[in-house]
Each structure stands twice: as C-alpha cells, then as structure tokens.
Image (cartoon, rainbow, N blue to C red):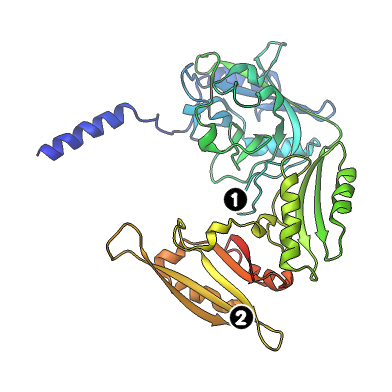
Amino acid sequence: MRKSAVACVFLLAAAAFAEPAPGAWHGANTNGVAQWKASHKAPAGFVVDAAARTATILAEATGLKAEETVEFFAIDSAWDRAYESLFVLPADVGELAAALEKAGLPRGRAVSERAVRLWPQGEPVSLSVRRAGEKEAKPYWEHLVDSRAAALPPLSKTALLYAGGAEPARGFSFFSAYSHNESLLQLDGRHEQSAVYGRFRPKTAWKPGELFELVLSWRAAPRVAERVVTLGAGTDLAAEIAALRTACAGRDAYVRLAFSNDVTLARAVACARAFKLLDGGALKMNGFADGEFYYGAFLPEEKWRKREGRIFQPFEIRFARAADGSWKKTFTLIEEDWSGDGDDPALIPHETAFADWAEVPALMKKGGQQASKIAVAFLFAPADAPVSVLKSALALRPRITTFYVFQEK
C-alpha cells in the first residue's frame, strides 16, 4: 500500500510538469483565414510570384507564451507540434514546396542519417514576418529570443536554406529550429535537436489565431555546387582540391568522394583525412556517391578496435589475402551474454568464413533479436588492400547502413 501511494504521488507530480500533449491544429481564426484566401485569390493559403522570386504565406499565431520553447518556427496544420511552434500555416506545406520549385527555387537535400547527409543542403533564402495586411516586415529572428546568443553565432549571421524536406509520414514542418529532415527550411550548419532544444522562445506572446504573413524570397543565381570527386592512386590531391575550390568559387560546395579501383585502403585513409580538414569550411562533405562508402568510413576511432568498452557490438568482417592472391572473408557475430555477475556482459565471438555476400544476412539472423537491431559493420583489411575489394561489402546495404574500415598490419 505504501509503495502504491508513493507511486501515485510521483505520477501526479509527473503529470503536473509534463509537456503539453501533441495534437493537430484545428484553426483559431477560420473566418480570418477564409477572408485572406478570398481577398488574395489564394485558396491554397499562399501566393507565389515567380518573376519577383517571392512567396507570401498566410500563418496563424499559435499563442505560445513568452516562457515557452520554440522548436518549430512554423508548421502546417497536419503536424502535431503546434504546442511548440510559433506559427501554423493553413497551407499544405507539400503543395507549397511544389509551387516554390515550379517558380524556380531549386530543391535541396534534407539531412538524412541513412544517406549520411549531415549538413542541410540548399539555396539560401530570406524569411520575414509581418501582420496580415501590413507592409512592414521584420526578419524572422526578430520575433525570437535566443537564450544562447552570447555563445553561438546569431541567427542574423546564419544562412537559412531551402532544403526541401523529406516526404513526411504526416504533416510538414515549414521551418524547424533544429536539423529536422522533414523541414522545408533549415538553418545552415549542424543543429542537433538535443543541443537546440530550449534555445528559442517567443519575443511576443500573440493571441492564438492572430494572422501574419511569412514572406519568403530567394536569389536568381543558384549557389549550390554539388560535386563527386573521384580520386585515383596517382591523383595529385593538392591539385585536385585547388581545382575544386576554383570550380566552386563563390558557391556553396557539397562534396562526395569516390575512389578508382587502383586505390589502396591506406591511400583512401590519407585522402579522407585531407577532406576531413576541409569539411565545414571551404566545402561540406555530404552523403556518399553511388557504389561508394561515405568518406568518414575510413576514419574510425582507434579505440573502437577493442570490443570491451563498446556501447554495442557491430558485426565484424575481416579480409585476408590468400596464397593465390584471392581474398578470404570472415564474418564475426559477437554475442553478449548478460547471465553472469558484474555490470558488463561476457563477449562470445562466433566466426564464420564465407565466400558470397548473399550468405551474410543469414549469419546476421543467427544473432536473434540482439543482432536485429545492429546496422553497423566494422571492416578490417590490410593497408594495401584495394578499396574495390572492400566496396564489395556495400552489397549489405540497406541492411547495414553504417560502415567503418580499419587498417590492419
């Protein structure tokens, strides 16, 4: 009984401090929205002017209070996060995206863990806000309080990109404060949700349903330069980088690496290190080329070699050269046995030689539920192994989404 009472107290306390429950936005000013659409001859809730390269988008204030967190600047009404968004658009953001792209705004690429696109990619845009019916508009950041303005670059100095957003399961974010893959607009840079949460608050506590217009504009000349850089064993790396900088001068370069068949693992690691130094400055490494590893696969942490201390146990695949010059492959499934004493499991490796990659999925399944959650593979190979041999492991996509390659002596 005593335990039950204590539990009840904790439940009541949790309920008192719980986040507002997610829910769809049903509109607080339906008459005003209808009048705006009629007067602007814009049944979709927005007007796009292709010649002027602008879009005027109707928005309802959600009524966030001054002390509440802004995680989304604006969403559409099908998205269930109105309780942490400054505005809700009566428009369907998917339809808005289609109209913007038809008007000449190139679609970018949203961030994606699976595609290893860690940077939002897209054309820079400007976003300002005004009350519906008024002429004067202020930059969007003037409507936000930034609690970390002293430590981080201000929004006024951070580019806003038209990434385009991934197709959502339900609803759309128009503009998210963090790097959200379903958001049409994204702040340039890497902005993880956990790091951004709580940073922004409303500068003004508007009433729910107050009508505003979001004014989006973009430039005529595109800035995005997307490049696949293919490196060979004899490529002059410094000259290649200099040529890349020249070709992308005045533009935002997003780069993926590819390696020709004559490149060794050691050479690939050296090239990856060079581009790592450039990532986020002169250019941004974003995603992987067809049939290639993400360049960061060649830059694993050395401490990961040791199984003890890993957070989880990735699959291990080893390449060894046979006497006849062919390559032998061994798959290792590492079982974690938690039945003993202590805080750490006993690690039991199960090694199996295999000839064809089609055999590997069955070997993974032998790990049961524990292995079914693992989507990472560690590859181990001699430094002089051709990268073309290692790339054969990409046959395991999409079951394996993340690869790291370790040089062996």
Instruction: Please name whichever residue, 35 or 70, is drawn nearer the observer in this view of the structure.
Output: 70
Q: Secondary structure at mark 1?
A: loop
Residue 131 locus on image (x, y percent): 64, 13
Residue 88 visible? The answer is yes
Of the two numbered discs 1 and 2 on the same chain, state the one appearing first in sequence. 1
Instruction: Please name whichever residue, 86 or 24, is drawn nearer the observer in this view of the structure.
Output: 86
Left or right? Give the position of 308 relative to 143. left
- The residue at 81%/37% (across/down) is 104
Instruction: Please name whichever residue, 327 or 125, is drawn nearer the observer in this view of the structure.
Output: 327
Q: Secondary structure at mark 2?
A: loop
Residue 350 found in image quarter: bottom left
Q: Is 91 rendered above or below residue 290? A: above
- The residue at 67%/43% (across/down) is 119
> Which numbered dot is residue 356?
2
Q: Which residue is under mark 1?
A: 113
Q: Amino acid at mark 1?
A: Glu
Residue 215 locus on image (x, y percent): 71, 22
Say few, some or many: other residues with alpha carbon within 10 Å of mark 2 (under 14 / 14 to 19 / 20 or more). few
Residue 38 found in image quarter: top right
Left or right? Give the position of 80 relative to 296. left
Q: Amino acid at mark 2?
A: Asp
Left or right? Give the position of 78 relative to 18. right
Q: Is 224 rendered above or below residue 271? A: above
Locate the N terminus by quadrant.
Answer: top left
